[in-house]
Image (cartoon, helix red, strand yellow):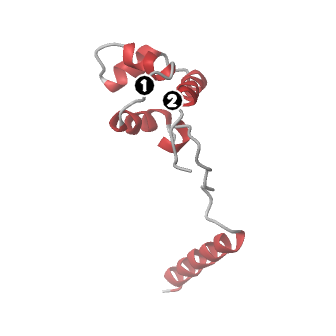
Amino acid sequence: MFPMIDKKETGLNLRRIMDCRGFTVKDVQEYLGLASVQSIYHWLNGISMPTIDNLYALSELFGLSIDDMVCGNRKRKSVAFGTREALNNRIMAYYTKINERTAA
């Protein structure tokens, strides 16, 4: 299946994020430097989507990745390092490097 963005769900998600972080539509408008709040209401109502530039700026404002803001039909990939074994290998490699530097 071709991955698609759900504008309605994304709008609801953006509203939840704004509410949780205490941002008003006016706050977002001023942060993005938009002339009016109308486009933000269009996003929140699922009529349209923010441009990629605005999504990038919103990710900075909200402290989230774009994937955490946009809702679609693709399966979410784990953000973790992969398997537990892969994580352990990365930690051990880091630990080894630290020990090499302190021993030198």
Residue at the image point whose x is 58% and y is 79% from the top: 93
Tell me if residue 5 can be seen. yes
Q: Is residue 54 above or below residue 28?
A: below
Q: Is residue 55 above or below residue 32?
A: below
Point out the tag, 2 or 1, that comes first from the N-terminus: 2
Residue at the image point whose x is 38% and y is 35% from the top: 57
Query: Which image quadrant is residue 38 in?
Result: top left
- Residue sitting nearer the eye, 3 or 43: 3
- Residue that label 1 marks: 48
View extreme (right): residue: 84
Query: Which image quadrant is residue 86 in?
Result: bottom right
What's under tag 1, amino acid-wise? Ser
Tell me if residue 65 can be seen. no
For residue 21, side relative to residue 49 (left or right): right
Residue at the image point whose x is 28% and y is 15% from the top: 35
- Residue sitting nearer the eye, 92 or 55: 55
Gap between marks 2 and 1 measured at Cα: 7 Å
Sort mark 1 into few (<14), some (14-19) or many (20+) by Cα contacts within 10 Å. Answer: some
Q: Which mark identifies residue 7? A: 2
For residue 54, side relative to residue 88 (left or right): left
Q: Is residue 82 above or below residue 67?
A: below
Q: In x, y percent, where is residue 78?
A: 63, 56
- Residue sitting nearer the eye, 27 or 42: 42
For residue 50, side relative to residue 6 (left or right): left
Q: In x, y percent, where is residue 1?
A: 56, 50
Name the element at disc 1.
loop
What's under tag 2, amino acid-wise? Lys
Name the element at disc 2.
helix
View extreme (bottom): residue: 104
Residue at the image point whose x is 49% and y is 81% from the top: 101
Q: In x, y percent, where is residue 32?
A: 34, 26
Residues at marks 2 and 1 touching, judged by CB atoms closer than 8 Å: yes
